[in-house]
Image: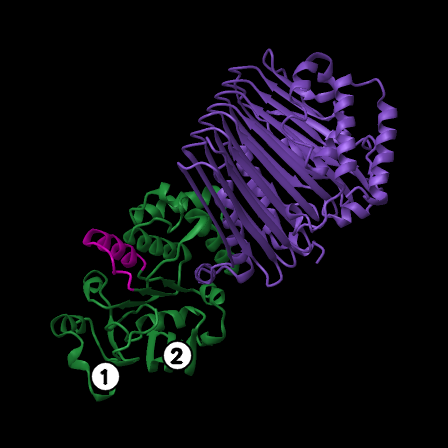
Chain colours: A purple, B green
Amino acid sequence: MKDIGPVADLYRTELSRFEREIAGTTPAWMQQLRQAAGTRFADLGFPTTHHEEWRHTDVTPIVKTPFLTAKRGPDIAKAELEPMASWVGAGHLLAFVNGRFSPSLSLLKRLPEGVIAGSLEDSCVVSSGLLEAHLGQQAQYDDHVFVALNTAFLKEGAFIYLPPKMVIEEPILVVFASCANGEATVSHPRVLIVAGSSSRATVIESYVGLKDDLYFTNAVTEVVLGEEAVFDHHLLQQESRAAYHIGTLAVHQGRNSTFTSHSLAIGSTFDRSEVHALLAGEGGSCTLRGVYAATGRQHVDIHTRIEHAKPSCTSRQLYRGILDKQATGVFNGRIVVRADAHKTDARQTNNNLLLSEDAVIHTAPQLEIFADDVKCTHGATVGQLDRDVLFYLRSRGIDLEDARRLMTHAFGSELIRLIAQDRIRNRFTELLSRWASPSHSESLPA
Amino acid sequence: MPDPILQISDLHVATAGKEILRGLNLTIRAGEVHAVMGPNASGKSTLAYVLAGREGYQATAGTIRYEGKDLLIMPPEARAREGLFLAFQYPIEIPGMTTLQFLKAALNTIRKHRGLEELDAIDFLALVKERAQLLDVDVDFLNRPVNAGFSGGEKKRNEILQMTFLDPKLAILDETDSGLDIDALKIVAGGVNALRRPDRAMLLITHYQRLLKFVVPDYIHILLNGRIVQSGGKELALTVEERGYGWLEGPDTRISEEKAAP
């Protein structure tokens, strides 16, 4: 797969230009990491649909589009970002435009002693050791070309660090806003979160398009949880309806740590979101809940992989998909139980609602179990709106269109209502509701 | 005599390819409470569903006029907006939608249709509290998904609660008494009685006369084999209690051994 075509050449040209531009501004280890990843990117090449992991997701449009590295974003006004960020209330905000950190749009309140929430680049100065120890360790670029590509451009991003026992109640919102301004651009957002033992925090990652631009977001987030850490993660994907989004969330969990993630994917024309969680210590608990909703010609692909490496860990995956018009979806959930991971308790459920005859979902659980004393269950359903419920709603005066909208919303709400924090739950609910409303779907391209 | 709210003439209805109602006639006027009684598979639920507009219930002959208009061409939501309400025998569960959301969506749709303003959150909650009290419903339970995990009695009370919200002209109660213990039955009956008004009609559909002790109808009709075979006053319920339905069976009204499709 070495012959990876003119676009890969373009990326290589962009990479050399990038390296020249930033020469000497990043630590040596980071430059080495970029170089290794860049080499790996060239070796791997872009996948085709012959590649098992990409069977139902064709990256040709990404490969064929000459995306240029996003320039520093046009100066967007605070007011433009406000609706994307103000809902979080009194929390902390890290804002990025086209992958670049924007101190003026960010809202960094005073954080307790020892906590870091800021730009990765700035953190290189004081926390180089922490970054070196963790960056590129969880999100493996060896076998993932898009992670390799992101890592090859590694320089900016968000860094969050919690010292042991630190508890932060207010959520930290990290917004990656994109605004291409007529030129097809790519950005490679990077987030690193290191949560010390027994720490506790809530983070929201939000990807938003400010206009209906064509651009490509290739994001990587790494989360490292120490022993007994409790971490609530949220992911909102509201990219522009012309945009391509590829994201990888890689989580490393220490003993008795608890990781919970809620995701809502409603934007972009193409979304491939991966979650890789490694339960690396005994007694860890990992919960992934996600709602994906697609219409028009949107394509959404969720790939999860939870690896139980140590005994007595629990994992729960609950994903719901809503597909309308000609939208296509993929859910591929993998559970790996290593040989000594006894007493593993793993569950996976994927429910899909198809709102049109043309919508398609490919759903497949993949279980690889090498231990004996384990409990692993999985289930997948594909269905339409329940006719009895539709009739019940109509018999109360609600017209067919509204009944469908209410039921669609209810289907997704069942997961969203499990979000612990009110503000975040309300925001997710509101976004899903807006997605399901007829005025929204009318404005969408067929 | 007030104009009829409902006028059913020679109604024939088939479901799943089988004729269930075979020439049913019934007229209901404002202020009246009618009860239709009958054994299993006599066509009681089919009557309820065809009135509410459930798909799969085909009127093959006859007419239904609702306030003078052809009911059969109206979609279910139009019937509801015009004031027809069916309390379901088996209320449907709606996972992910709370009863409050459901009530609010229904109430505001119907208010809008009637040219009334939508209720805001505060007025709506005040109304909910008042009505919930009437039916001894815990307000917390309205924050749970519609009917999900509700007991039989809770489901039936929820139906009547909806009825009090939607202010119908014609309320059809399909086996509302089934599955209720005596206390729940009294509460439900109290709710129904509170809704009796000179401008509102009710149709109680029931197998047993239990409910009719608490909600006393003006007229009782016996439905057998898809036809009304006997009509009378409230005393007819006592006859049914004593003698069952067997005495009404003639050669023309043999009860089908097959059960109607649910």
Query: Where residue A239 sits: x, y (%)?
Result: 70, 42
* In front of the other: A416 or A261: A261
Q: Residue at x 82, y 18 (%)?
A: A25
The quarter holding residue A295 reads bottom right
Find numbered disc 2 in the image and state the secondary structure of the residue it sits on: strand
- Decide whether residue B192 is among the magenta residues: yes
Query: Where residue A32 sits: x, y (%)?
Result: 77, 22
Q: Amino acid at mark 2?
A: Ala
The C terminus of chain A, quarter of image: bottom right
Query: Where residue B63 sits: x, y (%)?
Result: 42, 81
Q: Which residue is mark 1?
A: B254
Q: What mark, if any, has residue B14 been given in the picture?
A: 2
Q: Is residue A182 in view? A: no
| Chain letter for the residue marked with disc 1 in the picture | B
Q: What mark, if any, has residue A386 been given in the picture?
A: none
Q: Within 10 Å of the Cα at label 2, are there few (<14), some (14-19), or many (20+) other Cα atoms?
A: some
Q: Residue at x 75, y 19 (%)?
A: A29
Residue A44 vs residue A200: left or right?
Answer: right
Measured in 3D between alpha carbons, the distance from the residue under mark 1 to the one under mark 2, in whole angstroms, is 18 Å
Q: Residue at x 28, y 76 (%)?
A: B42
> In the image, which residues are magenta?
B175-195
* In front of the other: B177 or B85: B177
Q: Is residue B188 depicted above or below A18 in this figure?
A: below
Residue A197 vs residue B145: left or right?
Answer: right
* In front of the other: A88 or B130: A88
Query: Where residue B113 sits: x, y (%)?
Result: 52, 60
The quarter holding residue A175 reads top right
Q: Amino acid at mark 1?
A: Arg
| Chain letter for the residue marked with disc 2 in the picture | B
